[in-house]
Amino acid sequence: MTSNVLGMTTSTPVPTGPEGAISPEGTVTDRLVEANERYASAFTDPGMDARPVLRVAVVACMDARLDLHAALGLELGDCHTIRNAGGVVTDDVIRSLTISQRALGTRSVVLIHHTGCGLESLTEEFRHELEMEIGQRPSWAVESFRDVDQDVRQSMQRVRTSPFLLHTDDVRGFVFDVKTGLLREIDPA
């Protein structure tokens, strides 16, 4: 099995050598579009419905080290995946979960944070720094945290107490260990 993993993460040209020479292949986005063209050339419509087969929504951090489908044994069409910085339950996550449950039939919610999260090293000072640089304070909170277990508990509580969600009895939270690949369940109490 060959891997199509790209070793780049931005749309800016990628240097190829110590002199900072630009790759002749173009930007990372160009490479992604080319990869999509190869994918689409062999693509066949799987005939799936937008409703997740397993009726589960997974909320997780956007960290590039988390391959959620592989880690959870999921296939295309099994779940809704909602990702953001930290995997924290924000108003927008509640929005997505509400649509997932009310319009598309999900019943379970799995929350996944991870070890070594970048939000553990940020503070709300980040917003102040942005305001000083740009001249406008962001309307969103950073949602940084120091204790990953406690933040998972807080996220579970936000889901369980949302008046917009119909199904809050099967909400479970985990911390993914980026060194071992194992999930550790967090007691909500």
Image: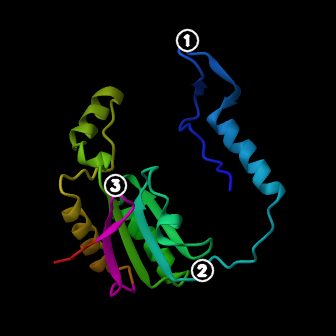
Q: Label 1 to label 3, Cα distance in Å?
A: 35 Å
Foreground: 166 or 71?
A: 71
Q: Residue furthest left?
A: 189
- Asked whether 159 falls inside the magenta stretch, the response is no
How far across and down, in percent of the image, does residue 95 sit?
43, 69
- Asked whether 175 falls inside the magenta stretch, the response is yes
How far across and down, in percent of the image, does residue 20 sit?
56, 15
Q: Is residue 162 above or below residue 146?
A: below
Residue type beneath disc 3? Gly
Residue type beneath disc 1? Glu
Q: Earlier in the sequence, mark 2 or mark 3?
A: 2
Quarter containing the C terminus = bottom left
Using a 10 Å C-alpha cutoff, classify the residue at mark 2 as few (fewer than 14 neighbours), some (14 to 19) or many (20 or more): some
User: What is the magenta range?
Assistant: 166-184
Q: Are marks 1 and 3 in contact (CB under 8 Å)?
A: no
What label sits on residue 86 in the rendered view?
3
Give the quarter of the image for residue 104: bottom right
* 64 displayed left or right of 180: right
The residue labelled by disc 1 is: 19
The residue labelled by disc 2 is: 51
Residue drawn at the location 31% of the way across and 45% of the way down: 118
How far across and down, in percent of the image, does residue 164 sit?
37, 79
Q: Label 2 to label 3, Cα distance in Å?
A: 25 Å
Q: Are marks 2 and 1 in contact (CB under 8 Å)?
A: no
